[in-house]
Image: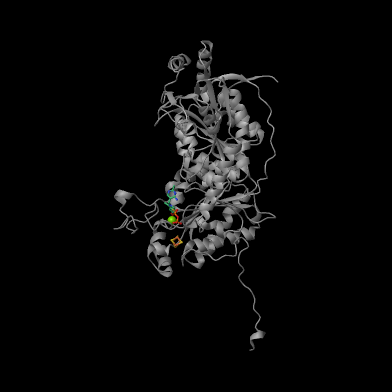
Amino acid sequence: MNKALMKGNEALALAAIHAGCKFYAGYPITPQNEIPEYMSRTLPAWGGAFVQAESEIAAINMVFGASACGARAMTSSSSPGISLKQEGISFLAGAELPAVIVNMQRGGPGLGNISASQADYFQAVKGGGHGDYRLLVLAPFTVQEIWDLTMLAFDKADEYRNPVMILGDSILGQMMEPFIPTPYMKPALPEKTWALNGCAGRQPNVVKSLFVGEGELEEKNYVLQDKYRRMKAKDVRFQTQDIEDAELIVVSFGIAARISTEAVSMLRKTGKRVGHFRPITLFPFPEKQIHDLARRGAKFIAVELNAGQMVEDVRLAVNGKSEVLFYGRPGGGVITPEELYDRLKDEC
Amino acid sequence: MNAKDVKVEKTVEKARSLKNVPFRYCPGCGHTIIHRLIAEVIDELNIRERTIGIAPVGCAVFAYDYFNFDMLEAAHGRPPAAATGMKRTLPDKIVFSYQGDGDLAAIGTGEIIHAANRGENITVFFVNNATYGMTGGQMAPTTLPGQVTTTTHVGREINTTGYPLRMSEMLATIEGAALIARTAVDSPENIRNAKKLIEKAFKYQIEDKGFSMIEILSPCPTNWGMTPARAAIWLREEMMHYYKLGVFKDNPTDSQNQTKSSGVSAVMRSL
Ligand SMILES: Cc1ncc(C[n+]2csc(CCOP(=O)(O)OP(=O)(O)O)c2C)c(N)n1
Ligand code: SF4
Ligand SMILES: [Mg+2]
C-alpha cells in the first residue's frame, strides 16, 4: 500500500472521517487548528456535519447531542479548551454516550504556551470532570499510530458507550511523517438501540445523566465501574523495547516515548542493560505488566514532559517491589535524547 | 333521571405526547400548562414519532418523565448546542429545547445567541418565571427590579445587579432568527395564544425556515410566595409591564437553506 505524508493533526482528521465520524464541532486553538480546518473542508463531502462552535463548551455539548442521536462524533482542542469541556465530558460519561475527544496538549497551567507538553495526564486519566468516571485514553507516538488509534477510538467508544480521549501534544499534531493509511475495517458492534432518532415503532428513549430515584445513582455508578474493569481486563495496550534483560526500564508515552527510545538505543550501543516500556493506553494503565517487571527486579524511570504525573501510576503499579525514579521537564520544556542519555547513563 | 341513563362523553383527552403520569410541578406552576400545550401541538401536527426534545437543568429537568417521545437531558444552559448537534445529525427530525431563564439567559447566553445566529432549524421554548425555581428562588437575569428573591433580600437593585434581560428583543436583532415571540400562560386567552405560537414555531421548523424561540411568561407561585391566583395577577401586572407580549421577529424566509447550502447569508444575497 502506498504511503501517505501528512501532519499528525490532518491524519487524525482523515482517519476519523474514514472511521465514519459524521459530526465534528470544535473551537480554534493552537496547536490543533488543522483538525477543524481539515474537517470543515472534508467532512461535508463525506456526508457529515462540521460546526465551528462558539466555545469549547458549546462544541462538547454539540457532540453530546450528535452522539445521543447515534452518530459517531468528535471534538478536538488543546489544554485550556479541554478544561472547558470537562463538564460535558462528565455528562457524556454519565449518560454513557460514545464520543472521541482529542487533546493536542500544550504547555500550562493557564494560557501557558503552545509548545509540547504532557501536563494534562492527570486530567485525562483520573477523570477530569466531576464524578467517578474514566475515559479510555489512547496515547499515539507516531503519525501512523495517530491514524490507527483514531480509528480504534471510535470503535472503543461505541463498544463501551464511553468517551475515548486521544492524548497527543503539539509536536505530534504538527509533525509530518509518512504512514500507511490502512483502510478502516469496522468490527461487529452492538446496535445503538438507545439512540434518539424518533420513537416510531418503539417506546420513547431517554438519554440522561440524572438518576434521582432511591439507590439509582449508586447502581448506575456500579455499572460504570464494571465497564472500567472490563477495559482493564481486555483493553490494555503497550509496547516494549529491549526489556528482557533490562535492569533499568524507561516508562514513557507519546512524544516522550519518541525521545526515550532514541536515548535507550544510544545506551544499548554502549552495552547498558536498559529497556523501554511504552503505555499506549494510559487508562487502562498497564499496571500488571509493570508490576511483573518490577517483581523481576527491574528499576523504573518515568520520563514525561511534565513535573511528574504518570510516575504516580508507575509507583502504584510497582507497589514497592522496586525503585521508581522520575525525569521530566514541566510545561514548555522539551527533553532531548542527549539530555536523557546523560541522565540515564549512571542509573544502569 | 336514573344514573345509568347518563351518557358520559370524554371531552378532554390526555395528549398522546404526554406519558400517563401525573405532573409533579407545584400547584399553579406554568411548566405544567406549557408541557401540555407543547404535547397537544405535537399530537395535532402528527410529529410525535419524529420529535426529539431536550430538557434543561431547572424545574423542567424532569420533562423527560412527562413527554412521550425521545428526550435528552442536557447540561445547564447547553440545550441549544445539543440541539445543534442533533439537528445537524438528523435534519429530518423535529428538535426542540425547553429552557428556563437561568438556563437560557444566564449560563447559556452564549449557546442561545449563536444557535439563533447560525439559523439552526430548531425550536426553543423559553420559560421565563423571573426566578431560579429549582434551586430555591434566587435572582434570575429576568428578575424584575425590586423583586425579592433569596439572593436579593431587599429587592433586585439594578445598580449592582443590572436590569432584567429582554431576551426576545435581543434575539430579534439576530439575522439568523426566523421567529421570535413572547407570550404568557396567565389567562385562557394568553394560553390559547401561546398554543398558536408554539404551533407556528414547530411549523417553521417543519418547513425548514430556521431558528425560532417562543418566550413564555410563566408563574412560579412557590418562589414568588403567592397563591396561584395571585401569581397570575402579578405576572399580568408586573411582568407584562416590563416584558411586552408580541411577535418581535417573523421572517419566514428559507434561512436554513440559504445559510447551510452555500454559506452565503440571507443578507448577502439581498445585497
Ligand atoms: C453548571 C451548573 N450550575 C448550576 C446548577 C444548579 N442549578 C440547577 S437549576 C438552576 C437554575 C434554574 O433556573 P431556571 O433555568 O430559571 O429554571 P426554573 O427552575 O426556574 O424553571 C441552577 C442554577 C447546575 N445544575 N449546573
Ligand atoms: S418551584 Fe416554581 S417553577 Fe418550579 S415547579 Fe414549583 S412553581 Fe414551578
Ligand atoms: Mg426560571
Looking at the figure, which quarter contains the N terminus of chain A?
Answer: top right
The outermost residue toward the top is: A270
Q: Where residue A48 sits in the image (x, y, percent)? A: 63, 36
Query: How does the figure colour the protein chain or chains?
Result: one colour
Q: Where residue B135 sits in the image (x, y, percent)? A: 41, 56
Q: Is residue A184 visible?
A: yes
B110, above or below A272, in the image = below
B247, above or below B121, in the image = below
Q: Is residue B250 visible?
A: no
A99, above or below A201, in the image = above
The image shows a total of numbered marks equal to: 0
Q: Residue at x 65, y 47 (%)?
A: B92
- Observer-nearest of A76 and B106: A76
Q: Where residue B47 sits in the image (x, y, percent)? A: 65, 55
Q: Where residue A190 sits in the image (x, y, percent)? A: 67, 44
**On the image, which quarter does residue A183 sit in?**
top right
- Observer-nearest of A204 and A335: A335
User: In the displayed structure, does residue B159 sit left or right of residue B213?
Assistant: left
- Observer-nearest of B2 and B266: B2
Q: Residue at x 43, y 68 (%)?
A: B228
- Observer-nearest of B68 and A143: A143
Q: Residue at x 39, y 58 (%)?
A: B136
